[in-house]
Image (tube, rainbow, N blue to C red):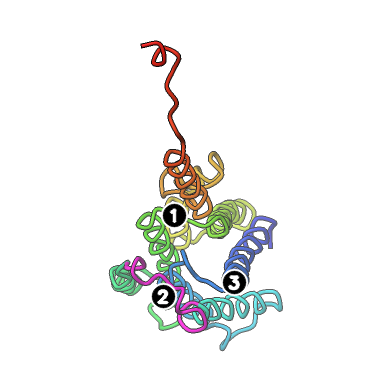
Amino acid sequence: MNVFRLAGDLSHLAAIIILLLKIWKTRSCAGISGKSQILFALVFTTRYLDLLTSFISLYNTCMKVIYIGCAYATVYLIYAKFKATYDGNHDTFRVEFLIVPVGGLAFLVNHDFSPLEILWTFSIYLESVAILPQLFLISKTGEAETITTHYLFCLGVYRALYLFNWIWRFYFEGFFDMIAIVAGVVQTILYCDFFYLYVTKGDPKSHHGKTAENAKQDDSSDSQKKNYRTHTVVEPSYGDLIY
């Protein structure tokens, strides 16, 4: 395992932990797309079925189990424990428009026409677009909590590091997987706009809207201004007193 893959895995794990801690500490899943989390749970489930058939390493097995467990834990928190805080009115992305085409593509373009291989390919394709409901939710509401932007940033770093991982493996191991590379490039492109704004602005408010914290501050400032205008008495100028 090279350093890029290890760093990518840790960044991916950090993103998942950040999201879980955010939900648990705030007792709220506001601003989080439950549909994206369902897609990620589906991704991990279909990708890691090899846990039942083979053993690669302790690290590999542990990471797979953690990803699957955390994915379903997140879905549980959103749709069960903190369901009252879930913004289903804005999380309206039609995920069937992703799942059906991706499923068809997995049947047509894969390394081997076998159940496990098709499901693995399906997971690769689906992961590349699974974040779309979350990005759609942010663009629709015009707000993104700071912790949510950190979660998306870590996911973007994970994908970028995996691009370097594939380059490393191609030059030093002779490994080349066109399906994984193309899907990874597509996924990284989806993060590019968000990643640029995160680095240059601190958050994606320039394009996807203000963070929830900034929105609250602006509302408070506007309220103070209104109160000031209401209670301020306009005194006449010196010229008005003369004439």
Q: Are marks 1 and 3 in contact (CB under 8 Å)?
A: no
**For mark 1, what is the residue?**
143
Q: CA distance from mark 1 to mark 2?
A: 43 Å
Q: Secondary structure at mark 3?
A: helix
For the point 49% across and 43% down, which residue is it? Answer: 197
Question: Which residue does the numbered mark 2 point to in the structure image?
Answer: 112
The three-letter code of the residue at mark 3 reads: Leu
1 or 2: tag closer to the N-terminus: 2
Residue at the disc numbered 3 = 20
Measured in 3D between alpha carbons, the distance from the residue under mark 3 to the one under mark 2, in whole angstroms, is 36 Å
- Describe the element under mark 1 as helix, strand or loop: loop
Q: Is residue 142 above or below residue 125?
A: above
Counting from the top left corner in percent of width and height, residue 232 is at 46, 36
What residue is at 42 percent from the left and 55 percent from the top? Answer: 186
Relative to the observer, which residue lies in front, 108 or 61? 61
Q: Is 101 one of the magenta-colored residues?
A: no
Which residue extends farthest bottom? 52
* Secondary structure state at the residue bearing disc 2: loop
Q: Which residues are magenta?
A: 78-92
Q: Quadrant of the C terminus?
A: top left
State the residue at coordinates (64%, 74%): 63
- Mark 3 or 2 closer to N-term? 3
Graded by Cα atoms within 10 Å as few (under 14), some (14 to 19) or many (20 or more), the crowding at tag 1 reads many
Observer-nearest of 160 and 155? 155
Residue 52 lies left or right of residue 225; in this view the side is right
- Of badges 1 and 2, nearer the viewer stands 1
Distance of label 1 from label 3 (alpha carbons): 19 Å
* Front in this rendered view, residue 179 or 128: 128
Query: Does the segment drawn in magenta span residue 89?
Result: yes
Q: Amino acid at mark 1?
A: Glu
**Mark toward the start of the polypeptide (1 vs 3):** 3
The residue type indicated by label 2 comes to: Asp
